Image: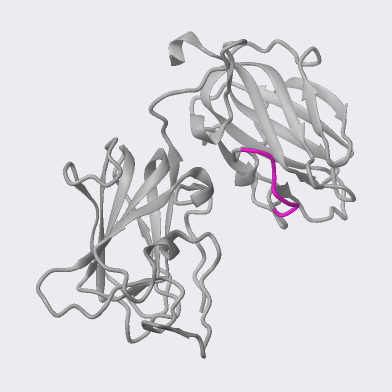
Amino acid sequence: MSVANPFQAYIRLDQPRLGSRVVHASDDFFGAKERLIDPVEPVFIADKYDEHGKWMDGWESRRRRTPGHDFAVIRLGIPGVVRGVDIDTSHFTGNYPPEASIDACISEDENPEEGWEPLLARTRLEADSHHYLPVDVDASVTHLRLNIFPDGGVARLRVYGEVRPLSFDEDEESGMIDLFALRHGGRALAASDAHFGSMHNLNLPGRGINMGDGWETARRRGPGNDWVIVALGRAGTVERAEIDTGHFKGNYPDHVVLEGGSFDSNEAAQNESDEWRVLLPEAKLSMDQQHFFETELEALGSITHVRMSIFPDGGISRLRLFGHASEDDE
């Protein structure tokens, strides 16, 4: 029986598209270390073999005949606070590690040798299973070290958390930053629906690569409209917005409204709150297009959260919210 992922509200920090990569493994004789963070779900191909033996979709070390244990080091593309992990042993049955732990550090080195601190204590693993494990360390890290005891195979390591950047990228000409950018700590918090596409795609780097690389709701058959609430990485004044319907052609929203608010916490930024104020009045959208708004925006001052309401439903590829960070948030 499948187990629901309890960390879906967080960002996947392990994504290669964010720059994350496996930089070292003590041994990957049977399965390449890079497969550990492959964004595609692991598969099993019964009759597939290579020069080392049975091909497995994951990282797998050879059978250890000496003391010690195997490990793999992952460098995160964007520093962040880890809130939970999934150590996935899917399809590994007689060759999974009985136990695993995770260490973390912050370093400018590609493959650090020092500074490691425990992140997840040594934990029992089961065959062919997801292991959703919470992490209670409130510190930004750049590297993770997955330790397996003593050897074996892990299909995937998923790392869920919040981006906590060490620096911010300002536009040299305007001095503005994308306050909602993932690299600046922006995060989607809640959505009315995300049947076809995750709300966490909205602030990924670059434009969407296809229709599946955006936030898309199911077809609405009743009254009302869909919405998503996002937290800015830094409190600030929003002075330019971009709403991109890239790849959405027969399923883009008819129009959109942006509202802003200043909340003490993410938990307080509820859809039912009466603190929302109009940032962008009703604006018409077109298919497969970047829409830029500047003069249309209301001057709200410093805000912490934005609600984007789409009418009645549909898909948005990216949302960019450019502005200046508040002085008290510098």
- Give above or below for 33 relative to 47: above
The answer to which of 35 and 212 lies nearer the viewer is 35
Look at 85% across and 26% down and name the residue there: 282
* Left or right: residue 231 compared with residue 226: left
Residue sitting at x 68%, y 26%: 274
The x and y percentages for residue 5 are 50, 61
Which residue sits at x=18%, y=68%?
Answer: 69
Residue at x-position 64% and y-position 36%: 229
Picture layout, residue 304 above or below residue 295: below
Q: What is the span of residues highlighted in magenta in the rendered image? A: 206-212
Image coordinates of residue 237 in percent, x first then y, are 61, 14
Q: Is residue 80 visible?
A: yes
Q: Is residue 29 left or right of residue 231?
A: left
**Res 185 visible:** no
Q: How many marks?
A: 0
Q: In the displayed image of the protein, which residue is found farthest to the left?
A: 67
Q: Position of residue 197 (x, y in %)?
A: 69, 53
